[in-house]
Amino acid sequence: MGRAAREITDTELSLLNELWQRPTATVQELTEALYGNTPAALLATVRKLLDRLEGEGCVTRDRTKWPHHYRAVLKREDLAGKRLQAAADELYDGDLAPLLTHLVRSQKLTREDCENLRKMLDELDGKGSGRGK
């Protein structure tokens, strides 16, 4: 992706969120999902935003159909990772550990969330696969 993750605008992120929820969508479908109606000015705005996202490699367009169908290429997890790393770079000199610690401590995690987090950490440490506790 050409731009830094933090440079994706809120409106572009709204488009990506819509595309992450479905396999493909047209400009009209996306405009209706975001705004509830499709006046020409809104259609043109959404089309321009999609063109920009396509140019950055975040979405792709199927030009074999009319109207064209767009699909997200950028994965939500990749964007989240880039944004978290950008926050760590800005706030903690690139160190993710204090940022993650802050996120875990400041959020209300369910018992299931905590168990999943422990399991993931154990797996990263090589303790989680195939061993009983």
Image: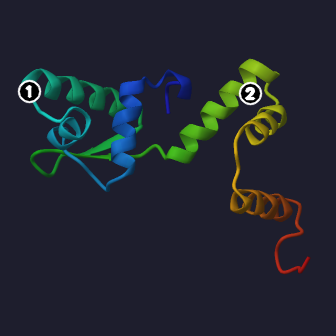
Disc 2 versus disc 1: nearer the observer = 1
Give the quarter of the image for residue 129: bottom right
Which of the two labelled residues, at mark 2 and mark 1, occupies the earlier sequence position? 1
In this rendering, would 67 be left or right of 16?
Answer: left
Check contact, mark 2 vs mark 1: CB within 8 A.
no
Q: Is residue 85 left or right of residue 66?
A: right
Residue 64 position in % (x across, y down): 15, 51
Disc 2 marks a residue whose amino acid type is Ala
Vertical side of 84 occupied by 41: above or below: above
**Is disc 2 placed on a helix, strand or loop?**
helix
Image quadrant holding the C terminus, namely bottom right
Instruction: Residue 16: give x, y in percent of width and height.
Output: 38, 39
Q: Which mark is residue 39?
A: 1
Residue at image location 88% in from the left, 79% down from the top:
131
- As drawn, 80 above or below 87: below
- What secondary structure is marked by label 1? loop
The residue under the point 46% across, 25% down is 8
Left or right for 77, reference 89: left
Where residue 60 sits: x, y (%)? 32, 43
State the scheme by which the image is colored. Answer: rainbow
Q: Which mark is residue 126?
A: none
Q: Residue at x 21, y 23 (%)?
A: 45
Q: Residue at x 36, y 40 (%)?
A: 59
Assess disc 1: are there few (<14), some (14-19) or many (≥20) residues with their C-alpha within 10 Å of its C-alpha: few
Q: Which mark is residue 88?
A: 2
* Amino acid type, residue under disc 1 in the picture: Pro
Number of callouts: 2
